[in-house]
Image: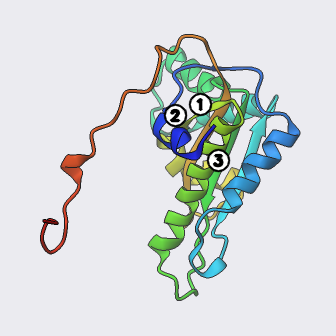
């Protein structure tokens, strides 16, 4: 797939099923993430791979988080929370782990982690898979972060759900409007 076609056809998948990436494809996804723009070469990201039965443990972690924040959560709500971790055969959690002592501003380091996540989304598509980027309340929960070995000051910027898109997609990706988001400084070209 041509790079520009890949960029213009990127969309979040509605439903992801197996098969997911094998080990070789997973390594390519992670390598693509590691090639993100990185001001200062700090590598301010961590990638946590969740697959197989580890997804069930992640679902329990999501349900526990919901139970802590909403003790009156219904059994159905807890079951829905558990099911979130089973929406794809592979999940990569992307964390921003900025170096507070670096001259590179923290926001730039966080953006580097976001760029790494974007690289992996595009790489998944290039490899014949699709993906969806989710966060949700679990991404901001200190207990969830601790389970992943992430400090409270760090950020879980993405849960990338990756797999094979089910056949329910309705054709080509419609173009996205962008002109109303562009200006020229100081004056428009003549």
Image quarter of the N terminus: top right
Numbered circle sitting on residue 63? 1
92 vs 157, left or right, is right
Q: Nearer the viewer, residue 34 or 98?
A: 34
Does the CB distance between marks 2 and 1 fall below 8 Å?
Answer: yes
Quarter occupied by residue 31:
bottom right
Q: CA distance from mark 1 to mark 3?
A: 27 Å
Looking at the image, tell me whether mark 1 or mark 3 is earlier in sequence order: 1
Up the image or down, 75 lies above or below 179; here it is above
Q: Nearer the viewer, residue 166 or 137?
A: 166
Up the image or down, 59 lies above or below 48; here it is above
Q: CA distance from mark 2 to mark 1?
A: 5 Å
Q: Which colour assignment does the render follow?
A: rainbow
Q: Say if residue 123 shows up in the picture.
A: yes
At horizontal 73% and vertical 47% (from top left) the residue drawn is 29
Mark 2 Cα within 10 Å, few/some/many (few <14, many 20+)? many
Mark 3 Cα within 10 Å, few/some/many (few <14, many 20+)? many
Give the farthest residue toward the front: 190
Which residue in the protein does label 2 denote?
A: 66
Which residue in the protein does label 3 denote?
A: 120
Q: Position of residue 49 (x, y in %)?
A: 76, 45
Badge 1 marks a residue whose secondary structure is helix
Image quarter of the C terminus: bottom left
Q: Position of residue 81 (x, y in %)?
A: 56, 26
Comparing labels 1 and 3, the label whose residue is closer to the camera: 3
Q: Nearer the viewer, residue 161 or 168?
A: 168
């Amino acid at each position: 797939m041509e790079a520009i076609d890949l960029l213009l056809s990127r969309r979040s998948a509605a439903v992801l099923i197996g098969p997911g990436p094998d080990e070789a494809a997973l390594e390519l996804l992670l390598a693509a993430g590691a090639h993100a723009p990185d001001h200062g070469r700090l590598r301010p990201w961590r990638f946590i791979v969740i697959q197989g039965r580890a997804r069930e443990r992640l679902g329990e972690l999501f349900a526990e988080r919901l139970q802590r924040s909403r003790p009156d959560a219904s059994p159905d709500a807890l079951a829905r929370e558990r099911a979130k971790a089973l929406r794809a055969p592979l999940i990569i959690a992307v964390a921003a782990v900025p170096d507070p002592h670096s001259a590179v501003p923290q926001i730039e380091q966080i953006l580097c982690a976001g760029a790494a996540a974007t690289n992996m989304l595009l790489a998944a598509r290039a490899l014949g898979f699709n993906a969806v980027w989710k966060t949700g309340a679990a991404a901001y929960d200190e207990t969830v972060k601790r389970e992943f070995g992430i400090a409270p000051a760090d950020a879980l910027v993405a849960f990338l759900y990756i797999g094979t898109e089910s056949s329910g997609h309705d054709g080509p990706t419609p173009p996205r409007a962008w002109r109303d988001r562009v200006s020229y400084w100081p004056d428009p070209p003549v």
